[in-house]
Image: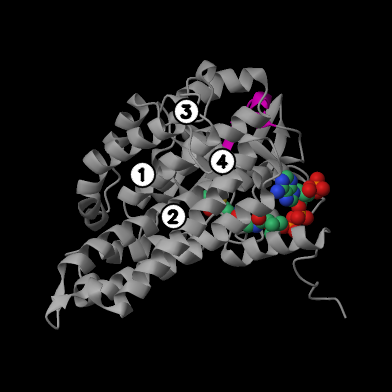
Amino acid sequence: MDFGLTADQREVQALARDFAQAEIEPHASEWDREHRFPREVFARLAELGLMGACVPEEYGGAGTDFVSYVLVLEELSRADAGVGVTVAVHTSAVTLPILSFGTDEQRSRFVPPLARGEYLGAFALTESGAGSDAGSIVSRAVPAGDGWHITGSKQWITNGRHAGTFLLFARTDPEVTGARGVSAFILDADHVTITRDEEKLGLNSSVTNDLTVDATVDADRLIGDENHGFRIAMSTLDGGRIGIAAQAVGIAQAGYDVALAYAKDRRAFGTRIANFQAIQHKLANMAMEIDAARLLVMRAAWLKDAGKPHTSEGAKAKLFASEMARRQTAEAIQILGGYGYTKEFPVERYYRDAKITEIYEGTSEIQRLVIARSILGERQPVAQSENAQ
Ligand code: CAA
């Protein structure tokens, strides 16, 4: 067992860290306050190859492994979690599933513009009545000529307003309820209409949209097998959750960095507050929990790179890292006291940003369900039917 990063992984990590600290972190508070999507940053990330880090070079990517990609997400999120989620959804929720489940033609047509950052990707699964219960989506795709007519509404779609390529899920078999009978489609921006910009607690430099679709597309927009798209969604989320866990680690690390520097500087009762055991215990807990979360993230990413099952390990990483980030960014505020509650320091932003990592790409409750199913080794029903005795 080797806990060290390879030279290549360290190089990608340093590239992302240097860029994030120089060109993202200094603007993050302003973007947060102004709710500004920093489009220019993604063009710069594309120049560095970081809009398709783990995509093979033949498809326009940088050809890194998945471990390197999650290191990039951690560094971006440490500077600005909104930038982190934009890249995470674009890459692991759109580009990678097209790469994994697309035909040769779909891969060569749709992946390079995404990997080169010419288009941003959006993952359109959730609907107003289908969040945790993703299998209950009602958007429809019906055969039309040689292709499909797709109608429906999607909610909380990260990147929606700025995306050029959508991975959208719709029901192709109306006779079946639940997760079966769903298919996945690759749509363009002009196939959808953005109907709403969400106002959020945090992640204000990212966009979250409602959209509607009413479009006829060619048959080659169906990705994977008809009626088996839910497996694509689930396997996409298996990888995506590792990225969100890395995002949570990055946010927590940022909170720790500020809290540590403040504790060494701030004086009370005639000494630096870092000399107080109460503060030392907080810093020790932060350092330990960030370390533990990062190890869970790295293990899950390593399993994915090795082509091994990682559903449960990704869920554990996301569950622990997200709850840890919420806990420890709150502790960072506590160390800064009144200053932590103000906009003079960024820790209140970290706290607001951390909260969403417990919700999107599957709530903590869903992660526990995924882990429990793996422990019990059998498919456990989510709920009893309302009509059951
Ligand atoms: N990999 C591949 N296939 C999988 C799978 C996995 N990890 N998990 C399940 N499947 C397959 C099953 O084998 C089954 O396929 P068949 O019917 O062909 O056998 C099918 O998917 C249905 O599986 P389940 O019966 O387990 O489905 P379920 O209805 O019981 O629910 C769930 C599963 C885990 C609760 C799922 O609905 C879920 O993950 N919910 C959370 C949704 C979620 O995470 N949404 C995130 C939205 S995207 C987002 O947040 C992005 C962003 O903006 C940041």
**What's the residue at 68%, 22% (across, down)?**
103
- The residue labelled by disc 2 is 249
Earlier in the chain: of badge 1 and badge 4, it is 4
- The residue labelled by disc 4 is 2
| Disc 1: CA contacts within 10 A as few (<14), some (14-19) or many (>=20) | many
**What's the residue at 24%, 71% (across, down)?**
274
Earlier in the chain: of badge 4 and badge 2, it is 4
What residue type is disc 1 on?
Answer: Leu
Answer with the quarter of the image where residue 376 lies.
Answer: bottom right
On screen, 59 above or below 213?
Answer: above
Q: Is mark 1 within 8 Å of ligand 1?
A: no
- The residue labelled by disc 1 is 76
**What's the residue at 58%, 65% (across, down)?**
364
- How much space separates mark 1 and mark 4, taking CA atoms? 25 Å
Mark 3 secondary-structure assignment: helix
Earlier in the chain: of badge 1 and badge 2, it is 1
Numbered label attached to residue 114: 3
